[in-house]
């Protein structure tokens, strides 16, 4: 069980590093480009990330 807990903690830390890197790159990005991002774990992302986008589109899978 403790190795699972450590893995989850490491995963959350990794997500934070990726989000921070994305935010830094987004701040430096200057162009008329369209940036599209996707995740299958939106519940662990910081809401500050969503504020960087004009639109957020949720797509659910059919069962």
Image (spheres, helix red, strand yellow):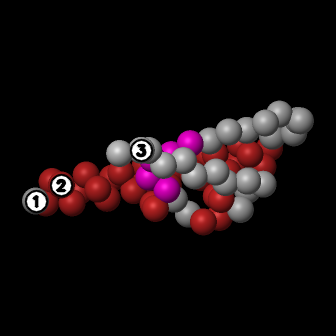
The spot of residue 16 in percent (x, y) is 50, 55
The magenta segment: 38-42
The spot of residue 15 in percent (x, y) is 46, 51
- Element type at mark 3: loop
Q: Which residue is mark 1?
A: 1
Is the residue 14 above or below the residue 5 in the image? above
Mark 3 and mark 2 in contact? Answer it, CB < 8 Å: no
Q: Earlier in the sequence, mark 3 or mark 2?
A: 2
Q: Magenta stretch: dominant SS?
A: loop
Mark 1 and mark 2 in contact? Answer it, CB < 8 Å: yes
Instruction: Tell me if mark 3 has few (under 14), some (14-19) or many (20+) residues whose alpha carbon lies within 10 angstroms of its own.
Output: few
| CA separation in Å, label 3 and label 2 | 30 Å
- Element type at mark 1: loop
Is residue 48 toward the left or the right of residue 14 in the image?
right
Q: Which residue is mark 2?
A: 4
Q: Earlier in the sequence, mark 3 or mark 1?
A: 1
| CA separation in Å, label 1 and label 2 | 5 Å
Q: Which residue is mark 3?
A: 62
Residue 22 location, quadrant: top right
Q: Residue at x 87, y 39 (%)?
A: 30
Q: Is residue 15 visible?
A: no
In terms of depth relative to the viewer, which is nearer, 58 or 21? Answer: 58
In terms of depth relative to the viewer, which is nearer, 61 or 35? Answer: 61
Q: Nearer the viewer, mark 3 or mark 2?
A: 3
């Amino acid at each position: 069980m403790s190795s699972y807990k450590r893995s989850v903690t490491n995963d959350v830390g990794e997500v934070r590093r990726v989000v921070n890197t994305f935010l830094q790159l987004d701040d430096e990005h200057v162009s008329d480009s369209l940036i599209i991002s996707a995740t299958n774990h939106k519940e662990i992302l910081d809401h500050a990330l969503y504020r960087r986008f004009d639109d957020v589109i949720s797509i659910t899978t059919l069962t």
